[in-house]
Amino acid sequence: MAPRRYVRTYYRFPLQYPVIFGGAPFVGEGLLTNLSLKGCSVMCDREALCGSEVRVSMWLNNELPALPVELGTIKWVNGNQFGVEFQRMPTEAQQRLNRLLRLELIEWLEKRHRTRPSSGSASRQR
């Protein structure tokens, strides 16, 4: 039977924040490379095991305390990069994450709007 393909539900914003992660056999530090409501990608100096359960602490915008993910599952591994799906996090942490991503979405939409040429300007000039 072919392995099931993993499909993301939420858009991942390209962000970079320091993280600490740990599972039963390992603890490590890395760099978060993108983030969504339900997951993130991490680059580090070791290779993780797909399917492992991990805890993750993220330093978002240098805010203290770190944003904790109590339980996550490593869904994919590509060399020293891996993707974590968030399974459980405290309500306060989920609210902080929601606020951060809402601000990122607003910024992304504003940039997109500024770079898009207006649709009616060419026809009005004629």
Image (spheres, helix red, strand yellow):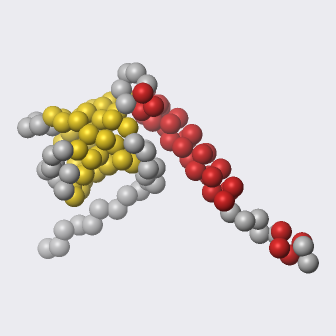
Q: Residue furthest top?
A: 64
Question: Where does residue 66 sit, x and y in percent of width and height?
Answer: 36, 26
- Residue at 60%, 45% in the rendered image: 107
Q: Is residue 47 left or right of residue 118?
A: left
Q: Is residue 104 above or below residue 3?
A: above
Q: Is residue 26 left or right of residue 70?
A: left
- Residue at 15%, 49% in the rendered image: 47
Q: Is residue 87 above or below residue 61?
A: below
- Residue at 30%, 31% in the rendered image: 57
Give 81 or 51, whichever is nearer the viewer. Answer: 81
Question: Where does residue 30 sit, x and y in percent of width and height?
Answer: 26, 40
Give 53 or 126, whichever is nearer the viewer. Answer: 126
Residue 69 visible in rendering: no
Give 103 or 31, whichever is nearer the viewer. Answer: 31
Determine the image quadrant of residue 120.
bottom right
Task: Name the quarter where the C terminus is drawn.
Answer: bottom right
- Residue at 37%, 58% in the rendered image: 8
Question: Where does residue 52 sit, x and y in percent of width and height?
Answer: 16, 46
Q: Residue furthest bottom?
A: 126
Determine the image quadrant of residue 28.
top left
Q: Is residue 79 left or right of residue 39?
A: left
Question: Where does residue 111 sit, x and y in percent of width and height?
Answer: 63, 52
